[in-house]
Image: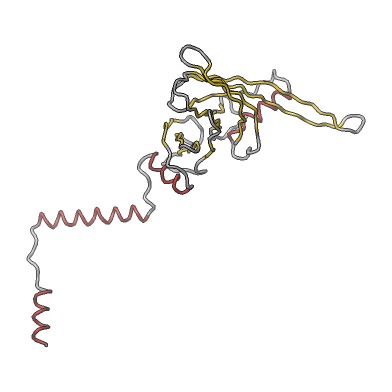
Amino acid sequence: MSIVTEFIRSKVFAKLPGLPRRVKILRNLALLAAAVFLFYLFRGAPPFTDEELFRRKERQNLLGPSEVLSIIDWNDIYYDRLVVAQSSFGCVLMPVYSGRTTREGVYYKEKTGGVTLMVAPGDVFWQREGMSLWLIAFDDAPDAVRAEITLTLSYEEFAPNILETLSESRYEGDVILSSDRVHSGFFLFRFDFSNDNEREYLELQAIQNFARMGELQNLNQKYPAKIRLYDAAGAQILEQETVLEH
């Protein structure tokens, strides 16, 4: 038995012939590349592209698979780009921050049929001039080249009067926004605002509340909206009443 054991050991553990220097270098480089790749995986495999990051967030939130319609360079003071996507069931927005990270994740809304309206996320400081609120209207009308939206803004305030009862003050007015087709699958609307002292107090309050709709803490705002789509000849091809909300 000992002779058989020694024979097997001599065959199995026989010294392999030495490798050429070039082969050793290539082997070591391959081992180093494998080690770097494993390190990359164990670190959570940071995404190489915005779409790869979006797919990861999509899976984490049990969404999709969605079609990425566009990745827009975004002029926001906090994030750099906005991923705009949709599936057959819903619409998705994802801000991409510097370093290809996401902080709040993704924003999802089920399709409402015809046109689905969403607010682009963002942080608004009313004192900062030149700020904008962006609305995104997802549509299934490829013949539409222009869109128009009418939003009804309102604000009410109750104050005590000399009879020690509450008196109501109320403002209601329309804001009309329009957009030409730039991106396939959606229209992008921009609402610019500034601290205009010439406005009446109640109107100014209504506009301030609407302008802050992109902030995360303002989740209970709802505004009646009417959307119209037009073709290249200027003919209206769709009119839809909806509600703008988070």
Q: Is residue 167 left or right of residue 232?
A: right
User: Residue 236: image x %, image y %?
Assistant: 53, 16
| Front in this rendered view, residue 224 or 140 | 140
At horizontal 67% and vertical 25% (from top left) the residue drawn is 153
Which residue, as the protein is rendered here, is positioned at the far bottom?
1
Q: How many marks?
A: 0
Q: Is residue 180 above or below residue 65?
A: above
According to the image, what is the colour scheme of the structure? secondary structure
| Closer-to-camera residue (204/134) | 134
Among the 4 quarters of the image, the one containing residue 244? top right
User: Left of 197 or right of it: where is 55?
Assistant: left
Residue at image point 45% right, 28% down: 185
The residue lying furthest to the right in this view is 163
- Residue at position x 49%, y 25% from top? 187
**x and y, in percent, of residue 197 in the image:** 69, 20
In the shown orientation, is residue 69 left or right of residue 125? left
Q: Quadrant of the C terminus?
A: top right
